[in-house]
Image: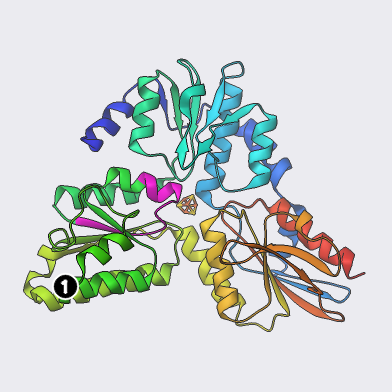
Amino acid sequence: MDTKAFKRSLQHSENYHRKGFGHQAEVATQLHSEYQSNLIQQIRDNNYILQQGDVTIRLAEAFGFCWGVERAVAMAYETRKHFPTERLWITNEIIHNPSVNRRLREMEVGFITVEAGNKDFSVVESGDVVILPAFGASVQEMQLLNEKNCKIVDTTCPWVSKVWNTVEKHKKGDYTSIIHGKYNHEETIATSSFAGIYLIVLNMQQAEYVADYILNGGNREEFMTKFSKGCSAGFDPDKDLSRVGIANQTTMLKGETEQIGKLFERTMMKKYGPQELNQHFQSFNTICDATQERQDAMFGLVEEKLDLMMVIGGFNSSNTTHLQEIAVDKEIPSYHIDCVERIKSVTSIEHRLLNGNLEITENWLPQGKIVVGITSGASTPDKVVEDVIEKIFALKL
Ligand code: SF4
């Protein structure tokens, strides 16, 4: 499919909306009262520190709602106002945050269910309004909704669209897109749907395996087994790795994406020589600023003397998990929670481990004076962070 031409024709359709509907001011007040926090603002204004009793809170200097998420949530609220009686759907979650998604359910926004990785669009009828989330939707989904004659409200973050443009450029130049991401993450699924030939690598280890294959060849069968879920149909490692371009899921660890880019640059230079490099390697900067700022702030925060870290964000939020990884690497006791209710008591907390499992830790809150580092993912409202801070203060009274 000519994805570029399809996107262009969709954008000219009267059923397609990617700007607000003129209710910005009204919605801004509503969002402020539902998601913002005076306490968090006070801490920001106080150089990201707040001390109360035995507890010192150290907030990361960049955290929480990013521009793209705020924009998507505002557009969803505006859509409800603009289409008060139409049936309204979201393809999966608008963002990875349970409190925002709960609020949208209260506003009678339906969520398309996912069965074994496939979305069930059978509930959507002609004339319904469907909101595409901040991390985008695949071109096949857009096509299906367009054929169903739905009104599409596209809240895809411009940073994500920038990655789509990058893979379109790879496709045009006959480069294979090497996408640093998680093959089953919504954003990477969407990005790969715009790519031509692609291969998804999760981390440096997988990237090194591919680079080694490029330089030295290897076991084709083993390669295909390893990447069976993360490559385009008909992918052939012996044929499709002679020209590569780099793209990424915008919420991956920035440093890792950069290292992966450099690794493939070195690999192609070694294989084809510096004169031929541009013929075999392409790289554009597609790391989102918000992800970068939050990760940089976290790297700064974990250098301080902290007794524990609270990392707050949805359990399927990739950028939150990466913030947690930074704390774990530093061997700081760190708890990834998605809402205040995970804090059961002064002695017990339920939290998500990096492997995705939930665990209950006893005696998590040290006695006496403590310094608590706090950060939150790009889809976490300040209100949720406030609830966590208030709870810690209450438990330490
Ligand atoms: S994290 Fe970046 S790419 Fe994702 S929604 Fe926010 S601004 Fe956009």
For the record, the magenta segment spans: 176-190
The residue beneath circle 1 is: 217
What's the coloring here?
rainbow
Query: Is residue 322 visible in the rendered structure shown here?
Result: yes
Q: Horizontal placement of 358 versus 120: left or right? A: right
Asked if residue 379 is positioned above or below residue 51 in the image, the reply reads: above
Residue at left 47%, top 35%?
119
Query: Is residue 161 visible in the rendered structure shown here?
Result: no
Residue type for callout 1: Gly
For the residue pair 269 and 92, the one nearer the viewer reads as 92
Count neighbours of disc 1 (C-alpha within 10 A) and say few if under 14, some if 14 to 19, many if 20 or more: few
Q: Horizontal placement of 129 versus 188: left or right? A: right
> How many badges with numbers are in the image?
1
- Residue 168 drawn at (x, y percent): 23, 47
Asked if residue 227 is positioned above or below residue 171 in the image, the reply reads: below
Q: Horizontal placement of 118 versus 60: left or right? A: left
Q: Residue furthest left?
A: 275
Rendering quarter of residue 238: bottom left
Q: Horizontal placement of 207 versus 213: left or right? A: right
- Residue 69 drawn at (x, y percent): 54, 47
Residue at left 48%, top 61%?
291
